[in-house]
Amino acid sequence: MSISKGLSLACLLISITAVAGCGESIEKAPAKKAAPTAPKKPEAEVDPEAEARAQWFYNPAGKRDPFASFVSRQAVASTVAPDAPPLQRWDTDKFSLTGVIWAVDVPRALLVDPEGIGHVVRMGTYVGRNWGKVTAIAEDGIVVTEEYRTIDGELVVNPVSIRFGMVRKK
């Protein structure tokens, strides 16, 4: 038997089976009578305002944005604004401490930036790209405290000590 004759025979058998299965020879089961039920009470009208209040909604307060880009945050943190003050053009670790006047009412320190320019700082002066603030001036160095938020929204306080004789990277 050739392949075409076998294929024709198979199609014929499938057709006959499909036509034979379409008949109405199945008997329907008699429907059971339902037990009498109590008459239905009229339904209370649904207040659309109450239904709207009952719906769930998402409150993103205090949660991080799951669609925020990690790259854009790093790029923003590493760029320097063209009008930034001279002490905020470099990272805190790029400065070197040259002098301290500490036994006075208002202590001061002399920081030298990577270009070799000296800057006099006092308590509360902003130093570095991360808005670090001078929080302590002592005879052996100064402390610059940087505060920033992580990607999870946690506040990180990072005290950076700048001491005499520390070799700074350029």
Image (cartoon, helix red, strand yellow):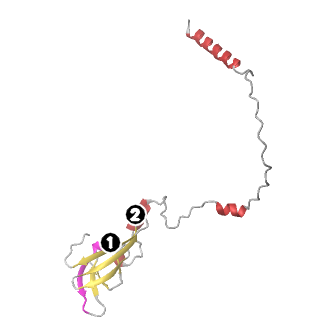
**Could you say which quadrant of the image residue 56 lies in?**
bottom right
Query: Residue 161 vs residue 46: left or right?
Result: left
**Could you say which quadrant of the image residue 96 lies in?**
bottom left
Viewer-closest of 92 and 23: 23
Instruction: Report which residue position mark 1 lands on.
Output: 91
Q: Amino acid at mark 2?
A: Gln
Residue 44 sits above or below residue 3 on the image: below
Q: Is residue 96 magenta?
A: yes
Instruction: Tell me the quadrant of the picture where the C terminus can be found.
Output: bottom left
Residue farthest toward the top in the current orientation of the protein: 1
Q: Amino acid at mark 1?
A: Asp
Say if mark 1 contacts mark 2, CB within 8 Å. no
Residue farthest toward the left in the current orientation of the protein: 165
Residue 142 sits above or below residue 33 on the image: below
Q: Secondary structure at mark 1?
A: loop
Instruction: Report which residue position mark 2 lands on.
Output: 74
Instruction: Tell me the quadrant of the picture where the N terminus can be found.
Output: top right
Q: Residues within 10 Å of mark 2 (few under 14, many from 20)?
A: few
Residue 47 sits above or below residue 148 on the image: above
Q: Which residues are magenta?
A: 90-103
Name which residue lies at 53% across and 64% down. Answer: 60
Name which residue lies at 28% across and 84% down. Answer: 137
Residue 100 image point, x, y percent: 24, 86
Residue 72 image point, x, y percent: 44, 62
Viewer-closest of 3 and 119: 3
